[in-house]
Amino acid sequence: MNARTSNPVKTIVLYAALLAFAVLFIYPFLIQISTSFKTDPDAANNPLSLVPNPFTAQVWQRIFGQTGDASVPVTTWVRNSVLITIVVTAARVFLDSLAGYALSRLHFRGRKAVFAGLLAVMAVPGVALLIPKFLMVNYLGIYDTYTAMILPLVVDAAGVFIMKQFFDSVPVSIEEAARMDGASIFRTFWSVVLPMAKPALITLTILSFQGSWNEFSHFLVVTRGTPEHQTLVTGLASMTSGQLGAGTQYPLKLGTALLTTIPVALLFFALQRYFIRGANEGGVKG
């Protein structure tokens, strides 16, 4: 009984400390939400207030094109971000899986050299590849197009590495029955091995979605920065730098930033249980 009577005090102190840290971390996000419903003068005069005075949804009406003001084309940025993210994510998951399976299962001349090259690419800082990317897309004649924004991102070394490591952990015996039944290599990959790769596929999907949605430097290099080819991230950067209107525009900026944050957060929270359990799945079922 004595131990039980002393534990509640420690528990209360512990939870109070956790609550304080939680408030500390979540407060900026709450400011972001509340500021998006403020007017420009209220946001400038009371930047840390969580209560808009007056409350207005004009920023969100402007973001979704309900006010007729096209000076900040957020709807175009959203459309570009969604299009590019969906295409890049789908292509990465499929192509990285194919490449990872080939490196794991197919025995061809130069396989070790290809894998070594893959590791070397992963070690190269992304900023070092910006100039080669610009020269390549310019040489191919696709500069300032959706093709230039999408094509260099459809395969990434980290994704191939993740899938290869997972396929290496799958026993070869699982595929033997399919091959004895006459299944081709691709059929075995698609129908037998890939369904077992759900943990790795979910991990790759989250990383690919987050990477392509938040991509900035690549889009900055392969486009002229015109609004028709801007995404939410590059558009928000141009708005923050003052290129799209005078004044602080805090509500518009934070509303756009909130719109940029929501999809990645929703995807992660929707798939986090699979993401966490991923390492425990796969293998032979008796």
Image (cartoon, rainbow, N blue to C red):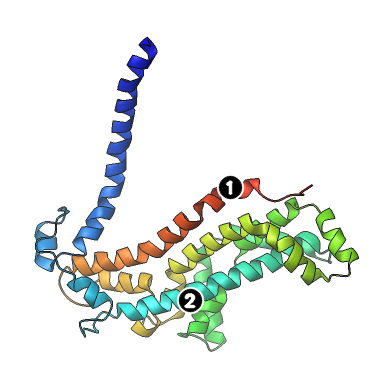
The quarter of the picture where the N terminus appears is: top left
Taking the spot 63% from the left edge, 58% from the top edge, the residue there is 198
Residue 225, placed above or below residue 108: below
Q: Nearer the viewer, mark 1 or mark 2?
A: 1
Provide residue 4's location: percent of width, then percent of height.
37, 16
Q: What mark, if any, has residue 213 been given in the picture? A: none
Residue 273 visible: yes
- Specify the quadrant of the image occupied by residue 136: bottom right
Packing grade of label 2 (10 A; few <14, some 14-19, many >=20) is many
Taking the spot 36% from the left edge, 66% from the top edge, the residue there is 260
Taking the spot 25% from the left edge, 58% from the top edge, the residue there is 32
| 90 with respect to 242 (left or right) | right
Provide residue 243's location: percent of width, then percent of height.
25, 76
Query: In the image as oriented, which residue stretches furthest toward the top?
Result: 2
Residue 243 visible: no
Disc 1 element: helix
Query: In the image as oriented, which residue stretches furthest toward the right?
Result: 180
Provide residue 127's location: percent of width, then percent of height.
49, 65
- Specify the quadrant of the image occupied by residue 175: bottom right
Packing grade of label 1 (10 A; few <14, some 14-19, many >=20) is few
| 24 with respect to 171 (left or right) | left
Residue 274, placed above or below residue 260: above
Disc 2 element: helix
Taking the spot 46% from the left edge, 61% from the top edge, the residue there is 267
* Mark 1 residue type: Arg
Foreground of the two, 175 or 162: 175
* Mark 2 residue type: Ile
Q: Which residue is mark 1?
A: 277
Report, in whole angstroms, how far the alpha carbon at label 1 lies from the one at label 2: 29 Å
Q: What mark, if any, has residue 84 been given in the picture? A: 2
Provide residue 164's location: percent of width, then percent of height.
70, 58
Q: Earlier in the sequence, mark 1 or mark 2?
A: 2
